[in-house]
Image (spheres, rainbow, N blue to C red):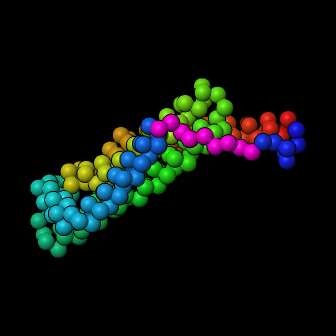
Amino acid sequence: MSPDSRPPLQWRLPPVPVLLTAVVLIVCAEVGGASMVRFKLELTRWARQAMLERPGTHGLVGVRDVDERVLDEALVKFDAGLRLFHLHAEGMGLVIIATATVAATLAGSPASRRPIIALLTVGGAGYPLGYLLWSGLIPYYGPDRGKTIAEWLVWIPFGGATIVALWWLAGLVAWQMVRRERA
């Protein structure tokens, strides 16, 4: 069969729970972004107070000029983590929809389709939560230790799941293209 005589590709929707997960993630991103703006002062005061209560964790020495620089740097990272949650949750919601649609359409067998879609959904929805965790840990553990905890608890497992699923899907799509060309 020549490439021109093939029937057009019929896109399939991913399962409804996958779409709902992606939509809820995007909604959380929007609510998080709006809350970040609305409660910026309150969040900053809370984080600053929590840091002042843990001077050893943050390397505070009791000299205002020195401590203010340290606190400012940690507060910038605290804010950055919240912003990164907002951005990554929006983006990963869209990534889940797009990649799960591709998997639902092009991953031929349920044996490969289901785990790919599950990994894309769980990994994509979980990954942005690492930024919330990091921000929440900064006042208690400092930016570096908080980041290490978020990496091991969230970013590595959920990001890893997404990466595995994307490579698996890319391999399946490439394999199917080769098969179609040979047919």
Quadrant of residue 20 in the image?
top left
Left or right: residue 154 compared with residue 45: right
Front position in the image: 163 or 38: 38
Q: Quadrant of the C terminus?
A: top right
User: Is residue 167 among what the camera can see?
Assistant: no
Residue 181 position, x and y percent, is 83, 40
Q: Count the marks: how many?
A: 0
Residue displayed at 19% across by 70% down: 68
At horizontal 45% and vertical 50% (from top left) the residue drawn is 93
* Residue 100 visible in the displayed image: yes
Q: Position of residue 170 (x, y in %)?
A: 65, 42
Vertical order, 67 against 131 (above or below): below
Residue found farthest to the top = 111
User: Which residue reaches farthest bottom?
Assistant: 65
Q: Is residue 45 left or right of residue 131?
A: left
* Residue depicted at x 44% and y 37%: 17
Picture quadrant of residue 169: top right
Task: Give the quadrant of the N terminus.
Answer: top right
Nearer the observer, 28 or 120? 28
| Residue 34 located within the stretch drawn in magenta | no
Image point (80%, 38%), residue name = 180
Residue 81 lies, with reference to residue 73, above or below; the image says above
Foreground residue among 20 and 28: 20
Task: Give residue 67's position: percent from left, percent from top.
Answer: 18, 67
Residue 83, x across and y down, in percent: 35, 61
For the record, the magenta segment spans 8-16
Q: Magenta part mainly helix, strand or loop? A: loop
Decide if residue 40 is on the left or right side of residue 120. Answer: left
